[in-house]
Amino acid sequence: MAKRHQVIVVGGGPVGIALAVQLGLRGVSCALLETRTGMHNIPKGQNLTHRTLEHFHFMGIADELRAARVMAPNAAIGEITAYRDFTNPYWHAPAGRELVHDYYFQRNDRLPQYRMEMVLRDKMAKLPNVEARFGWTATRVEQDANGVRVTASLNGETEMFEADYVVGCDGGHSIVRQQIGIPRSGTDFDQLMVLVVFRSSELNEELGKRFPVKSIYRVMHPDLRGYWKFFGRVVGSDGFFFHAPVPADTTRDNFDFLALMQKATGFKFSCEFEHVGFWDLRVAVAERYRVGRALIAGDAAHSHPPYGGFGLNNGLEDATNLSWKLAARLEGWGGDKLLASYDAERRPIFEEVGEHFIARRIENDGKFYDRYSPERDRAEWERAWKTKETDVGDRALDYDPCYEASPVIAGPPGGVTRARGEHVFHARIGHHLVPQMLSSGRNVFEELGRGFTLFAFGVDDAAVAAFERAAKALGVPFKSVRDTYADGRMKYETRMILVRPDQFIAWAGDTAPADADALMRKVAGRD
């Protein structure tokens, strides 16, 4: 007889494990199926945003994650961008995600994906309601009105798993996505890229002579048509990776990768190769994220080039968005509209990320280096090059995902769910809560409950009681936090803020709504 769980997670990379951990912490019974038994020690998914560290904080493993960092301590998270090669006089060290430190409860960090997976696996192993099956490959996904069935195999042995829901976190070639019939579309650049992982003390020494010590060193060349050649630090001071476009027929055996890297740097250095792999430069987004009781997340739902750290971070946001909604549905207080909102909230974000932050960036970089050249007009070039110094910081400030148009948010009229926005301190419906200190000395993030949390600043008890009664009647987990409307809390520019379990604002106002019951029904997906 098949063993029954509430949720089956197919795919045990960081997104799948993060989903299983968050579900497990909410008391949901899970089975996780992952083909791999060990780690792919390939340094992808390293650039972890402030928001991602917030996820790890709420999983209780932020400190463990930071302790797993392997990059040299003196290497700052940030990048150098050079024109043509690293010997060129035109380079800059633009500001980056440090510009948005104050808008998040955690600072960003950097470490290889396989180190993050180790931390996540350790956490998952401590959760008794999560059954991890490493080495097992899902081969068939079926569903009906009553649940799902996933057939998996290991060394010729076959087993069936049953659950209420299945989530495919199984990568770009997702078996779950294929079997539930969801197509993907997006921009294909028809460009093969190489990933080289290597060690070189000589490269580290040369970079130290020319630039501040940073985590990324990027080369922009007019011949690249907007594509990048870039080096990144991985382990210690001499561990690096390198990405660059290569001819379509390139293999591990017919190409001189050291010469390609030396052309990018502009100087000779020796190295010890550890890995050479390839990937296709394309943006792909699933046309929907759910079919019945089957859902997809992470690379199964969206994939893109490793430019800007958007892929893994968005996948982890998928897991956070989905975990509380699945738990609410299984606990009975969340309606089907709540689960349907996963697609409505998450898919538009990545559609804009893929096409605006990545595809358009490649296109605009190509146009820039075609238009401006120090060889043609040095004065014009230097004026234009100066404007590029804010590129990374501008993108960090511009990336502010929100769910204003969500069906389970009491959003503003004409609100749009989007990835681009403006970081501000005042509380906006559909946006991420900005941290702020309470008069108790604790941060609002330290007071958030497992369900909805209402912050009430200088309002009467009757306004809070209306929410408490509505939540109790619906069985919605709810916590209220009262404080004065003074000091930094006035930056919120509103006295009442209703925060969802994923730290996004569901409603805000100076007085209680006319119908608190209707509002709570809406945010629980039950209107």
Image (tube, rainbow, N blue to C red):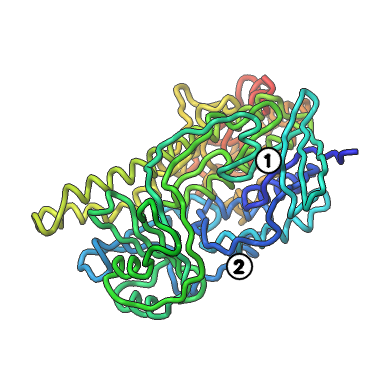
Task: Judge left or right: residue 467 versus residue 197.
Answer: right
> At which x and y percent is residue 479?
71, 40
For the C terminus, the quadrant is: top right
Left or right of 311 on screen, residue 1? right
Q: Nearer the viewer, residue 222 or 492?
A: 222
Q: Secondary structure at mark 2?
A: loop
Residue furthest right in the image: 1
Q: Which mark is residue 323?
A: 1
Q: Is residue 322 positioned above or below 122 on the image? A: above
Would you name the residue on which mark 2 appears?
68
SS at circle 1: helix
Circle nearer the N terminus (1, 2): 2
The three-letter code of the residue at mark 2 reads Ala
Kindly indicate the quadrant of the structure image that contains residue 169.
Answer: top right
Residue 453 visible to the viewer: no
Which amino acid is tagged 1? Ser
Relative to 6, say whether 372 is above or below.
Answer: below
Nearer-the-camera pick, 41 or 467:
41
